Amino acid sequence: MPAKVALITGAARGIGFGIATCLARQGTRIVIADQDGASAKNAAARLAKAADVPTLGLACDITVRTQVAALVRQTMKRFGQIDILVNNAGICPFVDIMEMSEAVFKKTIDVNLHGAFHCTQLVAQEMIKRGRGGRIIFITSLAVNVSSAAQGDYAASKAGLHMLMKSFAIALGPKGITCNAVAPGMILTDMTRFHWEKPEPAAFVKQRVPVGRIGTPEDIGNAVTLLCSDAAAYINGVGLIVDGGHQAVCA
Ligand SMILES: NC(=O)c1ccc[n+]([C@@H]2O[C@H](COP(=O)([O-])OP(=O)(O)OC[C@H]3O[C@@H](n4cnc5c(N)ncnc54)[C@H](O)[C@@H]3O)[C@@H](O)[C@H]2O)c1
């Protein structure tokens, strides 16, 4: 049987690249899609060398449906199948909700929610045509349950993404395609580095997260790999929190 193919959005860096790395270690062939096409190609080349698997790096702004359609076409042309989709691309502008412009609010919803809608619909159509099932993972956030004044747009988009995942899980389950979410806690990436590398927040993480450290992109990649494994065949429509125990702590 040919090795599986995973398409991961926003995978030129950060959590997406961590997911790509973990799946590649299982021998999965990887498509790195990112709005930054040069970085996507570069990341794909690095991964092919490090993990010794075929990879493809493609430019795609997931908010533009025609670009997502082209991404799916190019992936099918190169690999002939898509077994796994990871809806990872996302943004978090960190603007106080009372100061936020309509444009910023709309953009966050467009990337975090509409982007995953386009990718899931168009990839699922290919999975259904092939008839071999598939796995679709949505990268949400602890912001599905909690928020802050600076994350009103983000939390609304991620809570919506969680419910979008459930709706696709119901629609696609009969086709053998499972849909689940992974909700990362505090993970050190370019999105969050500006905050977690300051002394006070860094000390907060050590004291507040039961495992005593901030998460890494590969912590999330390992959880995604678990949900994409054969052992997870009956897991559908759920969100897995991966936060070192942070949300288990009361106050
Ligand atoms: N870092 C954390 O602590 C954390 C916590 C919870 C959830 N998340 C979620 O994990 C995902 C990845 O976060 P990260 O920290 O790696 O972010 P990041 O900013 O480091 O990387 C995001 C990637 O997505 C790409 N991207 C942005 N908009 C895009 C678009 N329209 N089309 C295609 N690609 C686009 C960017 O170019 C970038 O390469 C996001 O959905 C984020 O909300 C992150």
Image (spheres, helix red, strand yellow):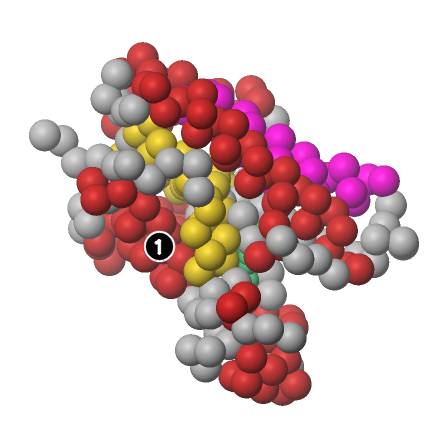
Which element type, helix, strand or loop, lies under badge 1? helix
Q: Quadrant of the N terminus?
A: top left
Q: Amino acid at mark 1?
A: Ala
Q: Is residue 169 above or below residue 95?
A: above
Mostly what secondary structure, the magenta segment? Answer: helix
Residue 191 is situated, as x and y percent measured from the top left of the image, at 59, 60
Q: Residues within 10 Å of mark 1 (few under 14, many from 20)?
A: some
Q: Is residue 189 above or below residue 8?
A: below
Q: Which residues are drawn in magenta?
A: 102-124
Q: Nearer the viewer, residue 114 or 64?
A: 114
**Residue occupying image coordinates x 50% and y 33%:** 166
Q: Residue furthest toward the front?
A: 250
Q: Nearer the viewer, residue 32 or 125?
A: 125
Residue 115 is situated, as x and y percent measured from the top left of the image, at 58, 33
Residue 247 is situated, as x and y percent measured from the top left of the image, at 54, 66
Q: Is residue 88 above or below residue 173?
A: below
What residue does disc 1 label?
A: 223
Q: Residue furthest toward the left?
A: 1
Q: Quadrant of the C terminus?
A: bottom right
